[in-house]
Amino acid sequence: MLLTRVLQLSHFNSANISSVWKLRLFQRSSVRWSHAATCGYKAVVFDMGGVLLPSPYTLAEGWEIRNNVPNGTIIEAILTGGDRGPWMKYMRGELSAQGFVQEFGDQCSNITGHPVPVHSFLSELTSKDMAKQLPEMTEAIQCIKAEGLKTAVLSNNFYLHSGESFLPVDRSQFDVVIESCIEGICKPDPRIYQLCSERLGVQPAEAIFLDDIGQNLKAAAQLGFRTIKVNNVKDALKDLENILGFSLNDFVPNTRSVRPTMDIPRDPLTKYLENIFREKLSGSLFVRQFSHGQSNPTYYVRFNGKQLVLRKKPPGKLLPAAHAVEREYRILKALGEAGVPVPKVFDLCEDSSVIGTPFYVMEYFTGRIFKDPSLPGLDAKQRHAIYTEMNKVLCKIHSVNIQAAQLEDYGKPGAYIQRQVHIWTKQYRSSETHKIPSMERLIEWLPLHLPTNQTTTVVHGDFRLDNLIFHPEKLEVLGVLDWELSTLGDPLWLKTYDLKELGIPTAEEYFDWYCKNMGIPKSENWYFYVAFSFFRIAAILQGVYKRSLTGQASSANAGASGKLVEFMSDIAWDFATKEGFRIFKSESGGLSTNPPKRLYSTWCRIHNSRASQNRTFVPKALLHSNQRGVLIFSPDGLSTKARDLYSELKEFMEIHIYPAEQELRNYQFSEKRWKPHQLIEDLKEKARTQGLWNLFLPLESDPESKYGAKLTNMEYAHLCELMGTSLYAPEIFNCSAPDTGNMEVLLRYGTDEQKEQWLTPLLEGKIRSCFAMTEPQVASSDATNIESSIVEDETLYIINGHKWWTSGALDPRCKICIFMGKTDPDAPRHKQQTMILVPMDTTGVEVLRPLTVYGLDDAPAGHGELRFDNVRVPKENILLGRGRGFEIAQGRLGPGRIHHCMRLIGHAERSLSLMKQRVKSRIAFGKTLAEQGTILADIAKSRAEIDQARLLVLKAAHLMDTVGNKEAALEIAMIKMVAPAMAQNVVDRAIQAFGAAGLSNDFPLAQFHAWTRALRLADGPDEVHRAAVAKMEMKH
């Protein structure tokens, strides 16, 4: 039985499928630049009044006439007021509506010599007539977005009397919304255009800006924007059409202009349609291409008022038996007559001379297609109703009488799964581009584990939510689309999401409905069907990817499918492994029909997307609360802002960082390694553009969010763990040590001049820094042992000392060093030390050598041994004051060590994830390593230890946020004692499971192990932390 792409399998987790499918297949950004190659632009930016809405200046002219106000008064008041006048202050949000009415009214009265009812003008300016978006602009925006370009509204707007901003447009139309009253800057200030460009993630030269005011356009043009003056909306849209190269009217949902490689000849198609409908074309034939779908190119066609859909084979050489539109036509015709909701088909054309390949024509349904299976925008009751209707339609398909529908020969009877395995293995082999280990294992495993009992029905082959058209208003399926893969066979096949709380059924529930509606018993070999389903998906994606390489793919984002093939085959092998365990248990009498479920976890599963949905211990009423008194164990419980940052960070790492790791690891062993890799710099710029930058700065240090993301320590802890899954991620997001600690020192203790000279470029990622404290001659775990001297000499301090393990000192971008030394050896022990800023190019600063950790030199940053020989720096370089170095050091250690510990948990989580993948795929002594008892014991230990350490770190972060660093001293000391040792143990187990490969540069494990071991010293020796914990414990 083969039930295709329903949703919900509790054993397969939503975080996994939703993040990957939505990210890679349904995600807008994957096709966002599809038109950019032809038009050269990536975004269109619209002004509001006079562009999207009626012109306020035209309104002003009419209002003046109606209220007996001299013509031009409003314009004169705006112009004479200038940048500090009430109009511009109102646009920047500096005046309330009441204040504006008073000040602008006074200004107008001074011009006219008598009172002017400005309150009446403001009322008309915000009236319903003025708040209606021009329909031609709405349609143009739809067309622009359909081509994959971004859109933005950039408005000089204001606050209403209610306190809400005046922006009467549908915000969902725009990727970016810039409101002057909220940002505090307005056009023509160049900063607001730059802000819009940054949030769009494009360069000004890649964007087009439409406005009705010349000075606004001039300012934009000076930054590089292409500009269009809007005097007449229709003329402006015509200009925009000419620039973009596609039509901005006649929009049809889910379509775009026909891609050049997929264009079809209009004249022969017109003659064909005239023949089948027996009428001449009046006017021109209108054709658009449906934007989604990876297989057969599909077009919307309008012929004399008839709305049609044309579906054809793609051009070029195709895989055997693929893209059989002839079969689609036949099944649609038969099912329509059997009462299944499908579009009415009009004709099949097998003559390739008409438009290049065979095609058929069917009716066009006006309705809704839900592309996102999580059904955003609907309530739980509506989601439940949609999946119920979907299930009923599926049962109706599987209940069709094959003989009555004359479909006996539509597929071979019996042995369906066997044939499907053979067919998709053959299809995969014909499109194979490289060896994928999990696909090889599946090709061997599937034929050996075929189900013995199979049912034969009509099967759709690709039954999923976005292949259904629902009624525009009712939750009723009008038609089932995309029958390319249909045949006769076994109807059971599942794809899963864990979205029960959204009103979407679990896989078990959905399967229960299906079995009840069909009157059949449940299938015990559930995992086999799921494994085969994902194997088939992987084979399909491989075919799509192969076509993308030859330019034959019908979708612009087909190339992205290549990255998903291995991912899907890994999922398939996971379920094949589970099926093997099921068989083993059933044969040994230990099969449980109700395996226990893990209902919650503190684990935020990061790198491996095939993970259980995160749950939280926090009560629902407080789940998304901003109360700092709530301890959040899972990213799901974070504030909306922090949760969104987490999702964006995760997406960035999956797309950009993990795939680049091997290249970066190899570079670290090359001769060029002391020069920063350009890829790192490129990714830093990309991360900064996307707002994933300086996330580490705690709310307490930066309450106004001038420099960072305004996150609490606990919120950042979750993000920091995610970054810790890759050694390269922290630097890319400007969140790496020692820069983070040094930036916090400058922010907390630096003067305004020090911040301007050193903090600003560090925050911008233009330079890097180092921290010189540890000395080779003394036990530096006791900071009072430091011997380096800082001696006052008139206007200077003279520095002498020998430092080592100064991380980052060898980086060519390292421009500033925070140096710790003694200014007064006779003062009390903790008042002797001072911190001072030393530019790295100062005479007397000498980098002696790079130090290595287990042979790793950590290029290009390195860990340097430095000598400071009569180094002279100005007195104003001192931090906070003489004798306050120990105080700064303690302040620096709190948040910084939370960062280290959370990154260590990321190291451990990634290591465990890699270990699990490895042991599932490696076979020793006749069975997978995953079935070996010692391996399972190690996995269990690692899971428990990681969760224990995470909870302790989160508690420390929570206390730092709520009671302060001083009161959290015990917890901070404990995590420094626990986290490095835990991570070292987890990484060591992973290396042991990998065997010799774990020691190599092919995986991150060897470096993880080196740094986890090093941090048991770099954070202070374990013994010091144990002693600190014990002393504090003994006080109670």
Image: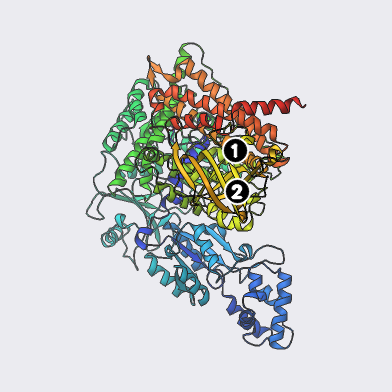
Residue 340 or 694: which is nearer the viewer? 694
Kindly identify which residue carries mark 1: 787
Of marks 2 and 1, which one's residue comes earlier in the chain? Answer: 1
Looking at this view, name the residue that lies furthest to the top: 588
- The residue type indicated by label 1 comes to Glu
Kindly identify which residue carries mark 2: 836
> In this view of the protein, can residue 126 be seen by the observer?
no
Looking at this view, name the residue that lies furthest to the right: 1036
* Residue 24 x %, y %: 43, 44
Is label 2 or label 1 in front?
Answer: 1
Residue for point 24% across, 55% down: 354
Looking at this view, name the residue that lies furthest to the left: 353
Q: SS at mark 2?
A: strand
Residue for point 34% across, 61% down: 38
- Looking at the rendered image, the quarter that the C terminus falls into is top right
- The residue type indicated by label 2 comes to Ile
> In this view of the protein, can residue 44 be seen by the observer?
yes
Residue 351 or 851: which is nearer the viewer? 851
* Residue 884 x %, y %: 68, 45
Residue for point 65% across, 75% down: 84
Image quarter of residue 545? top left
